[in-house]
Amino acid sequence: MSDLGGFSMYELFRAEVDTHCAALSDGLLKLESAPDDIGIIVPLMRAAHSIKGAARIVGIDAAVAVAHHMEDALVRIQKGQERTTRGRIDQLLEGTDLLQRISQQKESDLPEWSTQNASEINTLTIALSAAPTATPEP
């Protein structure tokens, strides 16, 4: 078993976000290329779920909300309740970027950062909850 005693819970959260956001980014780009391959979705759901759990442990509500809504959108795709659209992929990538930005904040700055970015967080979580809109092909 590895010794994690030298790391704070927040540092462990940051490591979780780094690992799982890399998997999300890679997987979402694969899903964009193969939107009907639902086998790609399970690891993405797990990554979002892991980030949600890590954020909950350290009490970062903004990250919990974003990861939760990302996971829910992926579950709907997996269950066939919605199709994979470029617009939805873009929203999920925005969520991934937002989670990375959250994890890059100093722990002491998070309350103020969350307040300053509440509108962006709320807009994204609402968009992830809504029915997807198709993005026109270029």
Image: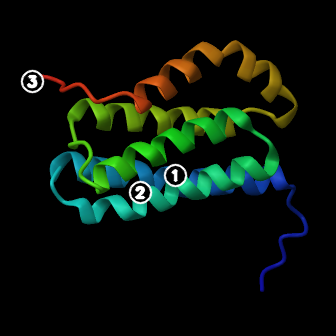
Q: Would residue 106 appear left or right of 119 to someone viewing this image?
A: right
Of the two numbered discs 3 and 1 on the same chain, state the one appearing first in sequence.
Answer: 1
Q: How far apart are labels 1 and 2 at the CA level?
A: 6 Å
Dots 1, 2 in contact, CB < 8 A: yes
The one of 131 and 122 positioned closer to us in this rendering: 131
Residue 32 appears at what percent x and percent y? Answer: 22, 45
In which quadrant of the rendered view does residue 37 lie?
Answer: bottom left
Q: Is residue 7 above or below residue 111?
A: below
- Looking at this view, name the residue that lies furthest to the left: 137
Which residue bears the numbered disc 3?
Answer: 138
Indicate the quadrant containing the N terminus: top left, top right, bottom left or bottom right.
bottom right
Q: Which residue is mark 2?
A: 44
91 relative to 125 in the view: left or right: left
Residue name at image x 28 percent, y 30 percent:
132
* Residue appearing at x 71%, y 47% in the figure: 55
Q: Which quadrant of the rendered structure holds the C terminus?
A: top left
Residue 71 in the image: x percent, y percent?
47, 48
Label 3 vs label 2, nearer the camera: 2
Task: Name the residue located 72 percent from the left edge and 35 percent from the top edge.
Answer: 61
